Image (cartoon, helix red, strand yellow):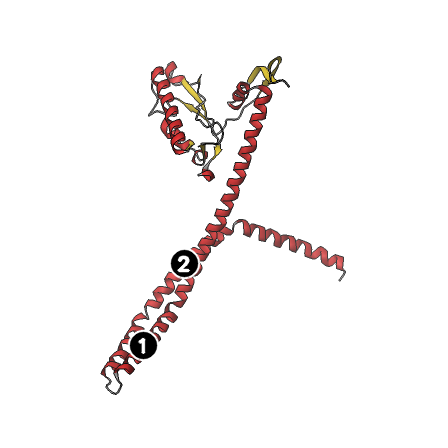
Amino acid sequence: MNISKLTNLTTPAINAAKRVIFKAKKVSPEILLAGGIIIGGAAIISACNASRHLDEVLDEAKDELDILEETEVFEGTTKKREALKIYANTSLSLLRLYGPSIGLTVSSVALIMGSHGILRKRYIGVAATANALNEAFTDYRQRVANLIGEDAEKILAMGGEQIKNVKTTDENGEVQTLKDKSIVIKNPSKSPYEFDFNCFTAPDTWSDNPTYIMCFLKAQQNFANDLLNSRGHIFLNEVLDMLGLERTPEGAVTGWFKGVGDNYVDFGMTESYFPDFQLDTDLCKKNIHFNFNVDGLIYDMI
């Protein structure tokens, strides 16, 4: 057969084998975990079957010890030696009886721990990637703030649709206003650090009294800063708990860490209104928008 034809035949098979190996590596934690559970079940069944013969081994050892005890031809030291042999033989019999169960149990634990090890390595890699992306995004925001001004950048981060009179800094460090330029964002996406605080999202902490609400929010913000300064870190979900808002998956790993970022907690509170067609009163339409100045991923810093 021509070598080129043989190569053409083997290439698809090699590619298919590579795809199978890649998919197997991708789901290897699930495969190891399932294998560990199955082998663990087999170990239990094996141990149950071995226990059916346990009485025979123990009875045989007991009979041999009784015969040895009734025998008078042996001296005391010889009897002890013979008894040790009986114990040793009984131990070997028990090991042969339960050996398969022990081996299966060890294999089951090894597979489950292997699955855990793979998942742990993957989590560390994802955490490192998320941290690198967060640092890159923070640097990007700082560059944008240096170009258009911090106030304009914060409005952009909060999803502002239009910013007029863009501010910029010249070579001498002086702030200039460019009146002829504006920034327009269409369909702005919401950040995972943005939340709406109203009677629907936080029914347990919301009040119709605006003075009480502002005092409550400022007190919670001060308390969050006290926790950050005293403990060194605070998670976003902890702040959401203070405000009566629902927790988020991102809030479990992100937050504020002392020595990183702004070194303070800022809710970024702005008042706004949201449409509601069932209730007509303004108090039910009142809404306070939060844009937390989260430092980013802090789970791996603690």
75 vs 295, left or right, is left
Under tag 1, what secondary structure? helix
Which numbered dot is residue 40? Answer: 2
How busy is the neighbourhood of tag 1: few (under 14 within 10 Å), some, or many (20 plus)? few
Looking at the image, residue 33 lies above or below residue 166:
below
Closest to the observer, 237 or 44: 237
The amino acid pointed to by label 2 is Gly
Residue 125 locus on image (x, y percent): 53, 43
Q: Quadrant of the C terminus?
A: top left
Instruction: Tell me which residue sits at (54%, 39%) in the image.
Output: 129
Query: Which of the two residues, 195 or 20, is positioned nearer the viewer here?
Result: 195
Image vertical order of residue 235 relative to residue 46, above or below: above
Residue at 40% x, 64% y is 102
Left or right, 182 with reference to 228: right
Sequence-first disc among 2 and 1: 2
x, y percent for residue 148: 59, 19
Residue at (50, 47) in percent of width and height: 121
Q: Amino acid at mark 1?
A: Leu
Q: Which mark is residue 84?
A: 1
